[in-house]
Amino acid sequence: MKKNFILAPGPTPVPQNVLLAMAQPIIHHRTPQFKEIFKQMNENLKYVFQTKNDIFTFAASGTGAMEAVVVNLLSAKDKAICIQSGKFGERWTELCKAYCVDTVIIDVEWGKAVEIARVKEVLEKHKDAKVIFSTYCETSTGVVTDIKAIADLVKDTDTVLVTDAVSALGGMDLQTDNWNIDVVVAGSQKGLMIPPGLAFCAVSSKAQKLVEVSKTSRYYFDFCLAKKALDKSDTAFTPAIGLCIGLNEALKMIKQETLEKVFQRHSCLAKAARAGVEAIGLKLFAETPADVVTAVCVPEGIDGAELVKIMRDDYGVTVAGGQAELKGKIFRLAQLGYMNEFDILTGLNCLEIVLTKLGYKFSLGKSVAAAEAVFLTYTQT
Ligand SMILES: *Cc1c(COP(=O)(O)O)cnc(C)c1O
């Protein structure tokens, strides 16, 4: 008998009460009943985004929110700075290119976070850049970037800061308003604990000024249409009703646990995962590892693609492999969303079994013991 454990950085496990809420017969969206759910959902989203700004919800994957930002804030020939330190940072550049936006690329070696001094330099040199695109947790490399430090540089300029927090939101502290992040994008299938299909853009008034002058053609993703509807707790088009109902449940769970405890939990799980893999001689790929995903170098002589495949196909444990240039070289174990100690222990257990089968030598049980030791220090304090 095989059980499925999803330990990848999206999609992430969905809690049972959320699944049950989504399994109810569909309701119509132009009803007081849905309006109330939608209102609650939007209020609770603001809590999780730590913002008073408008948050627009679209039926799309996370990339839809990224595209929405590009088409609403920029016009062809505008200048934008793109911080690129992995697959998702590159996506900002690709989106800008698709809409003929001129890009200034800050290219960062994969596995590292951008140096803040470099961002400062580029911002000073390109004062005419309308937007700077950043990624909070670069899911492809497991690196966290100091977004607060970047926001401190950007806040007194005319440039608008956009942050991709698709994998970070609901796992790591992101103080949208206190840190002055103009636009935050997120998706539903990661820290928010529901299936893929919803995309979010939190938009400040500074960013809204760019929306008013952007000449890029847009329709479904138009922030003006979205705002007009949102002001009346409504949506311009048919919302993904079932996902909104599920999200409302998931957000209530986050609120009940409190954001502070949610971040502590992710931090503890990530510490345990890091301690676990390091205890059996594996190296972390990220220089500054994020608390929502642990990227691990596959040891010499082991095929990373094979490792991920056997874990999934023979044991039902899904972790993510490496993307693009990191294919076969790293694997990524998530600590994201609806997860606790036993998800991490399951991942490490399975990793030990499969690594042993593939011929990697270490003492069995060591990674699990190291993770357990971390959990014990947390429960003691
Ligand atoms: C998952 C993810 C996305 C969005 O991917 P979709 O497949 O479009 O949902 C964007 N950025 C980051 C950092 C991600 O982890």
Image (cartoon, rainbow, N blue to C red):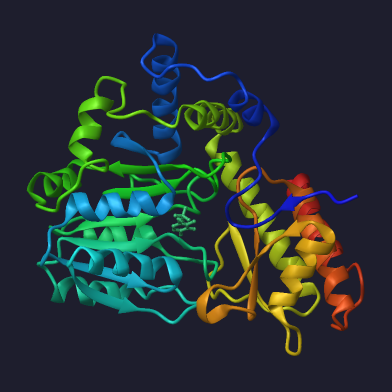
At a point 58% along the width and 58% down the height, the residue shown is: 291
At a point 39% along the width and 28% down the height, the residue shown is: 42
- Depicted 235 relative to depicted 80: above or below: above
At a point 61% along the width and 32% down the height, the residue shown is: 257
Give the mark count. Answer: 0
Residue lying farthest to the top in this orientation: 32
Residue 196: give x, y in percent of width and height: 52, 45
Residue lying farthest to the bottom in this orientation: 301
Residue 275: give x, y in percent of width and height: 73, 67
- Depicted 298 relative to depicted 227: above or below: below
Residue 314: give x, y in percent of width and height: 84, 63
Left or right of 166 in this view: 310: right
Residue 180 visible in image: no
- Depicted 372 relative to depicted 120: above or below: above
At a point 47% along the width and 77% down the height, the residue shown is: 112
Left or right of 7 in this view: 170: left
Left or right of 74 in this view: 319: right
Q: Nearer the viewer, residue 71 or 346?
A: 71
**Quadrant position of residue 370:** bottom right
Residue 11 visible in image: yes
Q: Nearer the viewer, residue 362 or 90?
A: 90
Residue 192: give x, y in percent of width and height: 53, 41
Q: Nearer the viewer, residue 111 or 9?
A: 9
